[in-house]
């Protein structure tokens, strides 16, 4: 008698379509196809590990060869000779091939040669090729013709976790099914049922942690449950699972983020030391902090997203997150998220994770206190040239290019006469008058060589032949005099107004500090 222990992932492996959890669309499609006799000659199943690709292939093989009916059945009995042999992996007509260890063209040729012979004990010969993306190019090419037109008694079932590596010529010959991540609630019900069958005490909180840690994979979740049972002797609670996963309690994470956003560096570092001393894995803690930031963003009142029922927090923890949200902006949460994402590979690669994590905390607290980019730009503009004030003046028209005309402006400026003595004065006046097209062209294309009240000497980088006339007309309307517009034919290497403002911004310590936080950051526009 075999006394070896069978792990839960194998013991409770799905044996029929009814027990295949979380893949309702796949089950409905395959059962309908079998019941109506529309059985394809090739299938390909793709999805993350542990979602049921190989299990589905075996169930389909049993459905095609079950002896309980005269033909294929969507409800294989599981007790006939063929069903039991397929479940044990011992059926002579159902061949499971690991493509990772049978990658060559010779392996495929052997399969193709054997496929020509009729099945021995079943109705169909079924070839299950697992991790098919591992096949070589030559092996794929050898498979193509037979995969497209196999003998009537042959069914191919391919499985892969990396569908993008499978040639499109193979995909076009198969019916494709994408196995989805199993929902958390479905996993919880499944784990609770297994715990009941195993006579194990599994608390709701521990079940929740296991289901979320499984990340949609039934096999991963059952492996974790197996480990938790072995560790606790059959009494699995939240504390035991957190210790096993080396995760901090979500309440601890919420309190830690509140401390971090409060701006007290000493308290935040002391809290991090305490969590680390208690055995938390720092990469897992960073992942929990990212989870908190994600949900805090979704729950932020500025988004008006309403109540997030799927947030993995208790009612008290959600209330605390909402209270924190009232004190911070979406902009701050977004910056914190970006820094955390950038820090994850650093944490994984560093030799001393604690030092890296401490520096991350300091960086996060620094950017949390920083003003937003719009606030920085507004402050920069406030410290720039003062708004243009009205002042009477006069001049005569002369020079190489001149233009006169009429322009309309707002009634509040009809009696005001501007004094323009610098490139920034002209830019501010155009913007204040809402001359958007003139302002945009002037600030982006015009190098002002010299400007006085009545004369502009400039180089034009653009191609608008009407610019000189339009600007002269506007200036005469605004200042009450004709202007000399002298255009030079070669660039004097002078900055445009936009370039000058960008240079001033880049030199500002606040802007430089903000840009240093993000790799390859640059100022792409100034408004």
Image (cartoon, helix red, strand yellow):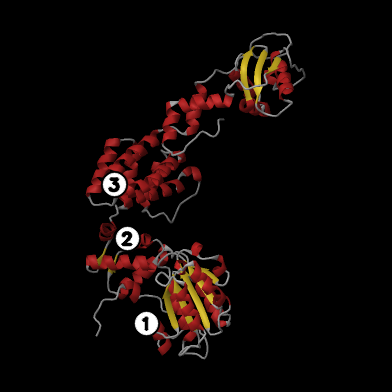
Q: Nearer the viewer, residue 121 or 406?
A: 121
Provide the residue designation for mark 1. Answer: 88
Marks 1 and 3 in Cβ contact (< 8 Å): no
Which residue, as the protein is rendered here, is positioned at the far right?
A: 405
**Which of disc 2 and disc 3 is earlier in sequence?**
2
Provide the residue designation for mark 2. Answer: 205
**Which of disc 3 and disc 1 is earlier in sequence?**
1
Marks 2 and 1, how far apart in space? 36 Å
For mark 3, does the 10 Å Cα neighbourhood hold few (<14), some (14 to 19), or many (20 or more) residues? some
Provide the residue designation for mark 3. Answer: 353
**Which of disc 1 and disc 2 is earlier in sequence?**
1
Q: Choose mark 3 or mark 2, whichever is in front.
A: 3
Q: The N terminus appears in which quarter of the rendering?
A: bottom left
Residue beneath the point at 46% across and 87% down: 66
Q: Is residue 508 left or right of residue 241?
A: right
Please provide percent x and percent y for residue 153. Answer: 53, 85
Residue 511 to residue 98: above or below: above
Residue 425 to residue 275: above or below: above
Mark number for residue 457? none
């Amino acid at each position: 008698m075999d006394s070896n222990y069978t792990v839960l992932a194998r013991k409770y492996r799905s044996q029929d379509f009814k027990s295949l959890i979380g893949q309702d669309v796949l089950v409905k499609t395959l059962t309908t196809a079998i019941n109506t006799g529309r059985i394809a000659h090739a299938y390909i199943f793709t999805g993350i590990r542990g979602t049921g690709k190989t299990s589905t292939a075996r169930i389909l093989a049993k459905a095609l060869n079950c002896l309980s009916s005269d033909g294929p059945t969507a409800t294989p009995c599981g007790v006939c000779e063929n069903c039991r042999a397929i479940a044990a992996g011992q059926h002579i007509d159902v061949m499971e091939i690991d493509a990772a260890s049978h990658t060559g063209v010779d392996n495929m040729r052997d399969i193709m040669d054997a496929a020509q012979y009729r099945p021995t004990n079943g109705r169909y010969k079924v070839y299950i090729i697992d991790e098919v993306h591992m096949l070589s190019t030559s092996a794929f090419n050898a498979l193509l013709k037979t995969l497209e037109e196999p003998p009537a008694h042959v069914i191919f079932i391919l499985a892969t976790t990396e569908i993008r590596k499978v040639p499109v010529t193979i995909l076009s010959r198969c019916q494709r099914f994408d196995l989805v991540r199993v929902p958390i609630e479905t996993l919880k019900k499944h784990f609770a049922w297994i715990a009941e069958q195993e006579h194990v005490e599994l608390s709701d909180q521990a079940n929740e942690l296991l289901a979320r840690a499984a990340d949609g994979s039934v096999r991963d979740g059952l492996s974790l449950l197996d480990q938790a049972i072995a560790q606790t002797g059959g009494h699995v609670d939240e504390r035991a699972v957190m210790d096993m996963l080396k995760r901090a309690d979500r309440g601890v994470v919420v309190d830690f983020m509140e401390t971090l956003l409060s701006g007290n560096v000493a308290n935040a570092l002391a809290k991090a030391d305490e969590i680390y001393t208690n055995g938390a894995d720092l990469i897992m803690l960073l992942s929990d902090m990212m989870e908190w930031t994600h949900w805090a963003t979704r729950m932020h009142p500025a988004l008006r997203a309403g109540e997030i029922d799927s947030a993995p927090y208790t009612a008290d923890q959600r209330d605390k997150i909402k209270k924190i949200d009232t004190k911070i902006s979406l902009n701050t949460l977004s910056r914190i998220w970006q820094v955390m994402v950038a820090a994850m590979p650093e944490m994984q690669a560093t030799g001393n994770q604690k030092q890296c994590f401490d520096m991350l905390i300091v960086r996060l607290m620094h950017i949390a206190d920083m003003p937003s980019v719009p606030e920085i730009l507004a402050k920069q503009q406030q410290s720039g040239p003062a708004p243009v004030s009205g002042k009477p003046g006069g001049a005569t028209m002369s020079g190489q290019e001149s233009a006169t005309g009429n322009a309309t402006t707002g009634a509040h400026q009809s009696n005001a006469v501007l004094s323009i003595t610098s490139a920034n004065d002209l830019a501010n006046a155009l913007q204040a008058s809402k001359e958007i097209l003139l302002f945009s062209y002037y600030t982006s294309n015009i190098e002002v060589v010299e400007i006085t009240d009545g004369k502009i000497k400039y180089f034009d980088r653009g191609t608008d032949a009407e610019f000189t006339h339009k600007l002269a007309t506007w200036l005469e309307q605004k200042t009450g005099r004709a202007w000399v517009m002298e255009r030079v034919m070669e660039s004097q290497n002078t900055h445009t107004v936009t370039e000058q403002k960008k240079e001033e911004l880049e030199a500002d310590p606040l802007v430089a500090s903000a840009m240093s936080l993000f790799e390859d950051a640059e100022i792409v526009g100034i408004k």
